[in-house]
Image: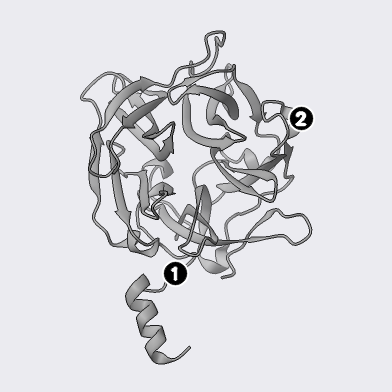
Amino acid sequence: MDEKTNWQSLEKNGPITEYNEPFIEQRADPFVCKAADGTYYFTASYPAYDRILLRSSKTLNGLKNTKERQIWVKHEHGLMSCHIWAPELHFVYGKWYIYFAGGDKDDIWAIRPYVLECADADPLTGAWTEKGKMGRADEDEFSFEAFSLDATVFENKGKHYYVWAEKVGVGKQISNLYIGEMETPYKLKTVQVLLTTPDYDWERVGFWVNEGPAVIHHDGRIYLTYSASETGAAYCMGMLAADEDSDLLDPKSWTKERYPVLRTDESRGIYGPGHNSFTEDEEGNPVMVYHARTEAEIEGNPLYNPNRHAMLMKIRWDEKTGAPIFSYED
């Protein structure tokens, strides 16, 4: 490729994308949605945990420097008045939806899942309306009664599924992942099904945690990544997998990796990688968006330390198993 062609490519696509480096600083729980027209949208947890911001770009790398727009702000009191966490933007059922978690100023750990809706073509400039708390199935007595967060949505074989983290237990609080089929964008059709609980030591550092689910499809398989342990250097990623033709509401359809698929790499200065999402670049190659820290020592409560940065990682596929490979090697 000659110098002229290189310059033309740079002019068209912007600066070369850097992987496994801070992409957007101080944005935890990053989520990138690539719309049908190729537009990229980015949202994440804002460090003050008090608003939902959205940005867009014609290129993936362009998200880095484009301006953010505030599309929603927390209530002054009551539901959705603090701890606004992990928003995700999805286009389902012909409209835009943002799924997020929020607490109550009078009960800050009463975290529950909520939904916003936008019927306009452009979610960045369109009008957003509150649809309230995510609804459970009529016969479900348990979902969203306790600390619930980190919901994601995916489609398979014409059905939409909702996956989220919820704490259970008396005394020892354990964060599990659950799945349900959706009846509408803001109500489940089926009762909750337990997907995974913190079984292994690497999921139990500080807190017993499975959270932050994300889904990617490949070669007839569904891969569901999640994050485990406390939000410091021990934070890491695990993975489940199922055949796309299996019953996704049957726990036996899913297999769980024994060891983390991504964890801290001190030699690279990447600590506590996790809470990822999946997208693709302009050529259709899969890319993971995740957050991580660049320092081992954290000042104060890790939850309120703002230095979790969105990063990008190229995804490769294992030639034998077809599973995604998560590697800091570019």
User: Label 2: how many residues lie within 10 Å, few (<14), some (14-19) or many (20+)?
Assistant: few
The picture places residue 290, in percent across and down from the top left corner, at 48, 52
What element does badge 1 sit on?
A: loop
Q: Which residue is mark 1?
A: 18
Rendered residue at 72%/55% (across/down): 322
The residue at the far right in this view is: 320
Q: Which mark is residue 298?
A: none
Q: Secondary structure at mark 2?
A: helix
Q: With 221 as the anchor, is 274 left or right in this view?
A: left
In the drawing, what numbered circle is on residue 252? 2
Mark 1 residue type: Glu
Residue 14 in view, yes or no: no
- Residue at left offset 36%, top offset 78%: 10
Q: Amino acid at mark 2?
A: Lys
From the viewer's side, name the closer residue of 85 and 127. 127
N-term-proximal mark, 2 vs 1? 1
Query: Which residue: 36% across, 58% down?
Result: 24
